[in-house]
Image: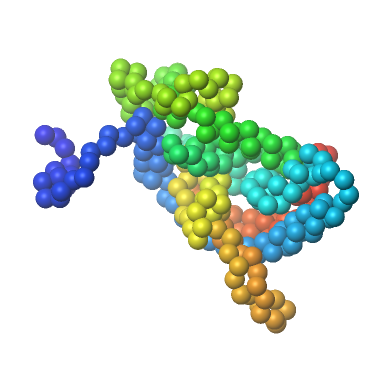
Amino acid sequence: MFRDFNIAFAKKHIKLRRIRPLTFQRQGVAYVLSKSARLIPHAAGNIEIDITPVVEYGERRIKEIKASSGKLTPEQLTTMALHKNLSAFYLKTISHVIYHVPCLNGFLEWTPFRNGGIFYEAEDINLGFTVHTKRGVMTPGMRNAHHKDIFSIANEMRDLTRKARRTDMNELYRRCARKYLGLAARELDPSSFSIGFLYLKSMLWPEPIDPELLEVPVEQRLQPEEVVGFTSVVANIGSAVKGWQTVTVVPHPSVFMWGLGHTRILPRYINGQLMPRHCMNVCVSFDHRALDGGDIFPFADYMRDYVDHPEKIFEWKPGDPI
């Protein structure tokens, strides 16, 4: 009674294999994404980036390190790892791109009947990045990567990724919901009723913590402040799933999200000659209320410039121009 008749029809006429209630984590994700899909008029774009200069730069650096005499130092080993896994390079590159195209970095308060709406352009560049775990996808965050060198970024990403894989997602989402609800109550936000109901339900009928995580010390788990407060999110799904390209959902109230696809070797004409090139698709989604195509187009030029000159990212030190 009082259920979607389409679901009732499907249950009656389709043989089911099993019935699986959503975890609190999935309910929270469903709430956030439903709100994004309901409120945000999404627009999306896709560009191809030739990252061959980045790959060739890394191959040269690795060759130089291997040619050096003696035992490899920890810094040399880290450098080699940086060039084999480009996640830190992408995160820092995107933070620099955002620095030059600041309209991508902020959040929209759309209040058409009060004042027409306000766009808050952020000075902090706080990037969430996706981590794939056996319990699902988590999104810890890197704060102000444009002020950090790539070694610091790589180390911080490694620590956050390790924490993500040692964190019970349902417990973490409950703690995040508690923080949000306190602020929602002070702001008298009626839209928080749904998440409040989910939180109450999770407290009355809590789900057991994964037995594998019971003995993990608190300091080795993600904390709420490490998974909230982002100005944009980078979904590097191409590093996890070969051949995959993605169109992302902008998390409310942000206005821009990045999706990095799988890198493939493709034939491309360079100076009139057909050559194999390492190509990656960058798929972006944005809130069309806050941004037009003309606002976001410059990001492609900045990104290609950093990719064509990877030393600007790999050799950047605090104090250098961004």
* Depicted 91 relative to depicted 195: above or below: below
Compare residues 125 and 291 and report the one nearer the observer.
125
* Depicted 156 relative to depicted 214: above or below: below
Q: Where is residue 199 in the image (x, y as percent from the top left)?
A: 36, 23
Q: Where is residue 254 in the image (x, y as percent from the top left)?
A: 52, 41
Residue at horizontal 34%, vertical 24%? 207
Give the residue furthest to the bottom: 272
* Depicted 70 relative to depicted 171: above or below: below
Horizontal side, residue 135 vs residue 58: left or right: left
Compare residues 36 and 75 and report the one nearer the observer.
75
Q: In which quarter of the image is the N terminus?
A: top left
Q: Quadrant location of residue 311? A: bottom right
Q: Position of residue 283 (x, y in %)?
A: 53, 57
Residue at horizontal 53%, vertical 41%? 131
Q: Can residue 308 be seen in this view?
A: no
Give the residue furthest to the front: 70
Q: Where is residue 290 in the image (x, y as percent from the top left)?
A: 51, 47
Q: Quadrant location of residue 208? A: top left
Give the residue furthest to the right: 69
Residue at horizontal 54%, vertical 54%? 238
Q: Is residue 214 visible?
A: yes
